[in-house]
Amino acid sequence: MSQKKRKALGVGSYLGSKVYKEICNRFYKLHRIKLPDHIASMYSVGVNNGQGIEFLARDAKAFEALLKMPAFAPDNQEHFCDRIASMATNGQGYRETGVPSLHIAVAPDLCSVHIDTFGFVAIGPDGNKYYNPDAIQHILDELVLQDKFVAWVTKHSRSIGLLLSHVHFRGPSSRNRYRLAAGGRVNVAQGAGWSIGIEASQALSGERKVEGSVEVYNW
């Protein structure tokens, strides 16, 4: 969507948002970047950290210059994982290494930031970028389900989008020791760095599981 068609949010409508606060806090706490100083107009604030925020930068080049540090790896469209994982990105993407992971997209007309729960990028001792298998979980759950489908629903009904943001796809990942199974999880309660939910899955072996669990992330 072009800048001219976007309507800026009033400051009072997003300053109290948990999503906005958590993104700003992570930028400053870990990287000493004061994100509010770089926001000219706020366009949208999602219902969860995975949807994040969209805004017009005061100076996109100056903001992007701050991201050129070892903590952020630029998306490389020549790499398959980067190309698939950034297909919703407008402009140049930068992905924080580690878990969880800030994912930033910078463009003159629109910037966006969200937090990926399943970070999959690491920088090795040789300075090269490496991927772990959590990329599959990230793409199917955080990109396709949450960033695409739930975000679309949220634009039409924020209350329904908020409910759907508690529903997640579950496949092989570091959380389940890459168990060859697929299913879903519903978070009954969730916050920054934790969730309490019910998960159902079926493995290729035929084993079925339905269990409640508490997940705690290194937020």
Image (spheres, rainbow, N blue to C red):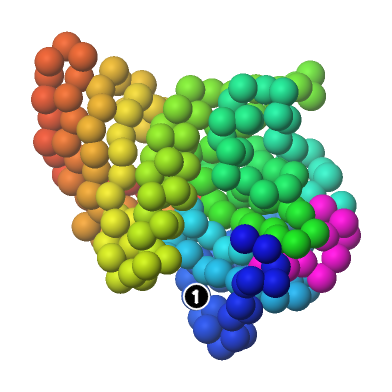
Q: Is residue 63 visible?
A: no
- Closer-to-camera residue (11/72): 11
The picture quadrant where one finds residue 25 is bottom right
> Residue 203 versus residue 105: which sits nearer the camera?
105
On the image, the x and y values in percent for residue 65 come to 87, 52
Q: Residue at x 75, y 44 (%)?
A: 92
Q: Is residue 31 visible?
A: yes
Whether residue 13 is in magenta: the answer is no
Q: Which residue is at a point 25% across and 22% down the rendered structure image? A: 181
Say which element carries label 1: loop
Determine which residue is flagged by label 1: 17
The correct choice, above or below, for 182 with respect to 165 in the image is: above
Task: Give x and y (percent) for residue 96.
Answer: 66, 43
What amino acid is found at the position of numbered circle 1 in the picture? Ser
Q: Is residue 132 left or right of residue 66?
A: left
> Quarter of the image containing the N terminus?
bottom right
**Position above or below: 106 against 210:** below
* Residue in view at x 13 percent, y 30 percent: 209
User: Residue 217, position in %: x, y?
Assistant: 43, 46
Q: Position of residue 199 (x, y in %)?
A: 20, 40
Q: Which residues are magenta?
A: 55-64
Farthest-out residue, top: 205
Query: Taking 184 as reference, is 47 above or below it?
Result: below
Nearer to us in this view, 56 or 128: 56
